[in-house]
Image (cartoon, grey):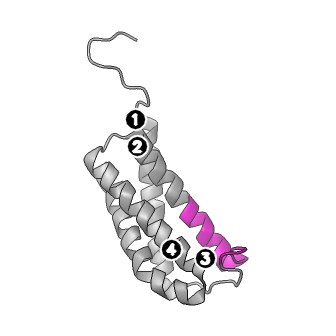
Amino acid sequence: MPTVVILVCAASAGIHAALAPEHFGEGFAAGAGFTLAAAALAVIAVVLSTRPGSVLGTGSAALVLAGLLASYAMAVTTGVPAVHPEVEPVSGLALATKAIEVVGLVAAMSLLRRLDPFPQPKGVLR
């Protein structure tokens, strides 16, 4: 399951990085948001690649993916105030990206339910 979250974060990071220049054309805030999303997702993918059982990494993945899904929902319905106030048209690439991010979010939430946030060394009684 960590592999699914890692792959989703890496794929979404690549897509957001590729779309950042186009969004900078629409405004600095929109481009910066895409760049920040790409950087955060890339860092999370690296963290989870090196520490697949990380509660912090998995929780960060869930939080960032949920935030991206929510911000896209706003972008196509009402616009995002101060960032992209115009309503964005729905695109196939965006829908495919959001479908992938939903899979990653579900996987991350499932992992979080199984991970122990306070692991004890072997031989220590709880």
Q: CB atoms at circles 2 and 1 under 8 Å apart? A: yes
Residue 114 position (above or below residue 20) = above
What kind of secondary structure does the magenta stretch mostly adopt?
helix
Q: Residue under circle 2?
A: 111
- Tag 3: amino acid: Ala
Q: Residue under circle 1?
A: 115
Q: Residue under circle 3?
A: 29
- Tag 1: amino acid: Leu
**Residue at the image point whose x is 49% and y is 67% from the top:** 36
- Can residue 1 be seen? no
**Residue at the image point whose x is 55% and y is 90% from the top:** 25
Neighbour tally class for label 4: few under 14, some 14-19, many 20 plus, Cα within 10 Å: many
Q: Distance between the residues labelled 3 and 2?
A: 33 Å
Where in the figure is residue 28, as x and y percent of width and height? 58, 81
- Left or right, 43 with reference to 20: left
Q: Residue under circle 4?
A: 34
Write the start and end of the magenta stretch as one range. 67-83
**Residue at the image point whose x is 30% and y is 44% from the top:** 52
Q: Which of marks 4 and 2 is in front?
A: 4
Q: Which of marks 3 and 2 is in front?
A: 3
**Residue at the image point whose x is 55% and y is 71% from the top:** 33
Q: Is residue 72 part of the magenta span, yes or no?
A: yes
Quadrant where the C terminus is found in the figure:
top left
